Image (spheres, grey):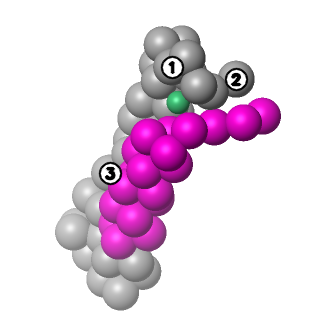
Amino acid sequence: MKTCRRFTSIKSGFEQDIRFLRGHAERHQGSVAAKTSAKNAVSAKRNMARALNRHLDHCPECG
Ligand SMILES: [Zn+2]
């Protein structure tokens, strides 16, 4: 599948977030903050899927 630059930038933005949250969760394992970060990483991943699907629905370049 061919995707446009906008798609790539949406994806990499979310991926950066997810990486940061996961890293934070690992560094603070066992703490409340780590649990929050892990949960946020999961929801960021879900948001990414939603944002990318929405993009694909509307983008004339992707598909
Ligand atoms: Zn696109």
Q: Residues within 10 Å of mark 2 (few under 14, many from 20)?
A: few
* Residue 39 location (% of width, % of height): 36, 51
What amino acid is at disc 1? Cys
Asked if residue 33 lies in the magenta stretch, the reply is no
* Residue hosting label 2: 63
Specify whether residue 32 is in view: yes
- What is the residue that sits farthest to the top in this orientation? 57
Residue at image x 34%, y 61%? 17
* Residue hosting label 1: 59
31 in relation to 59, above or below:
below
Residue at image x 43%, y 50%? 9
* Residue hosting label 3: 40
- What is the residue that sits farthest to the front in this orientation? 61
Q: CA distance from mark 3 to mark 2?
A: 29 Å
Count how many numbered circles sit on residues in the image: 3
- What is the residue that sits farthest to the left in this orientation? 33
Specify whether residue 25 is in view: no
* Residue 58 location (% of width, % of height): 48, 13
Over which residues does the magenta segment extend? 1-22
What amino acid is at disc 2? Gly
Tell which of 6 and 45 is nearer to you.
6
Tell which of 22 and 15 is nearer to you.
15
The quadrant of the image that shows the C terminus is top right
Q: Are marks 2 and 1 in contact (CB under 8 Å)?
A: yes
Residue at image x 31%, y 83%? 28
* Quadrant in which residue 2 is drawn: top right
Q: Is mark 1 within 8 Å of ligand 1?
A: yes
Q: Which of the two marks, 1 or 3, is nearer to us in this view?
A: 1
Q: Are marks 3 and 2 in contact (CB under 8 Å)?
A: no
- What is the residue that sits farthest to the right in this orientation? 1
